[in-house]
Image: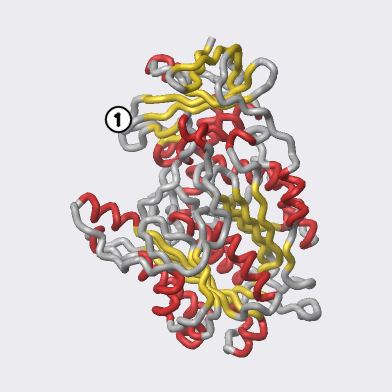
Amino acid sequence: MPAESGRHLPVLIGGGQTTDRPDDPTAGREPLLLMEEAARRAAEDAGGGAALLAAVDTVAVPTVVCHDYGDAAALLAERLGCPGARRLNTTLGGNTPQALVNHLADEIAAGRSTVALIAGAEAWHTARALGRAGRRIPWTPARAEDAPRWGDGRPGSTELEIRHGVAQPITTYPLFENAFRAARGLGLAAHRRELGEFAARSAALAAQNPHAWFRDGKSAEELGAVTAENRMIGFPYPKFMNAIIDVNQGAAVLLAADHAARRLGIAADRWVYPWAGVDVIEHWYLLDRGDYHSLPGVQRAAAELLETTGLTVDRLVHLDLYSCFPIAPRLTAAMLGIAPGDPRPLTVTGGLPWFGGPGNNYTTHAVVALAERLRASRHTFGLVHANGWHLTKHALGIYGGAPPPRGWQRAGGAALQERVDALPHPDVVAEATGRASIETYTIMHGRDGAPERGTVIGRLDGGRRFVAVLPHDAALLEAMEREEQVGRAGTVRREQGLNVFLPA
């Protein structure tokens, strides 16, 4: 069915993935080569080959974290035979691949692009192996950039948050997890079982995925039990529940206008249809969030996305909800209105801790995997959710096996973001003292498995929010992992420039 008058219909015509696991990890290929291979596989998947790549007019590369390429998009375009293509190099954020799909679908619908490529990769596994061997990384040097990075490049945390140890994902996502558990009245033992069962289900999907980094399909007991191999990182997550960036993985997606796909001879049975997309940002800084057991921006964005397409959440057969830590997909699912016992898996890849976490590019793999399912089941729909920073930046997209009756649509926009920005948030006290209670918390562990430090976000009497560290008391930290701490009373005082919370 044709798109709306004056607009072109964006179609996803090809996807490619690559996983590089040489016997000698120092011999792995650099990210630029993984991107190139994934892009060539995407062109082969579309049935277009080199002629299709030569027709690409826009090359977008999610930021490569393990190596600074500068203008990575220009380097990739040259290798693919489309050196004149417009280049988009991006800011940091796991939301980037789906945000790029949304943006490039807009560009194609408006006639500003006809064939666009998204390609990214990481090779941390090889980079780290070279570092351990004391060897220089012999990869392509950076190309100078001549344009600003695409995306929101604001720092993810405030100085206050950094100083109190709540700026790294391994700390911030456990804060959300513990708040989500307490908000549902779930006991610690039941929560551990829930996490183990979720992780095992995801790991089993990764075991069936030929592109996954971990294919051993660990059991709930193996994933949840704290051992020397599976040491606790940030309570309640042991190592096997953390996103694993120590991978060599690449993925690429090709989008085109329907008329360009026909002109290039791309068979219609390769086409998958982006129906609609939306982007939204929660209150930017962690301490400004209304609470830590909901995502009001995602909830509103998803509602607008479904309304735009005329679909209901039960019609989304295939899901990939960003899964850097177990809280992310489960909390997003709750915001979508998906019940905890829903039989649909929350990932089509296996999730970042088990499929692998290639930096900002994971969701490109998810889009490719979703497209494969839609090609095999044309009457179904799928949803991809991508997330950046601390459940901060979100991009969502609905895809179908059949063309959208109203063409590609963009949901949300400035009006949605203004409504989310206007949501209330608590007053934050930088230098806190007095009686207080815990809103959420986590305990961080060292490489030897012992608890090293704790972080609390809480409320002073009167409701103002603070962030604090816990005393360096191993017995206290260990005890705080054995019983629920959300709601626990205490006092907060100042010590050496920090807020310190002392439980009553």
Q: Residue at x 39, y 52 (%)?
A: 214
Which residue extends farthest top? 504
Q: Which residue position is annotated with label 1? A: 448
Asked whether residue 360 is in view, the answer is yes
Q: Secondary structure at mark 1?
A: loop
**Residue 128 in the image: above or below residue 146:** above
**Residue 17 image point, x, y percent:** 45, 67
Total numbered labels: 1
**Residue 198 image point, x, y percent:** 53, 42
**Residue 10 image point, x, y percent:** 66, 75
- 289, 489: nearer the viewer: 289
**Residue 481 in the image: above or below residue 198:** above
Picture quarter containing residue 413? bottom right
Q: Residue at x 34, y 29 (%)?
A: 449
Q: Amino acid at mark 1?
A: Asp
Q: Quadrant of the C terminus?
A: top right
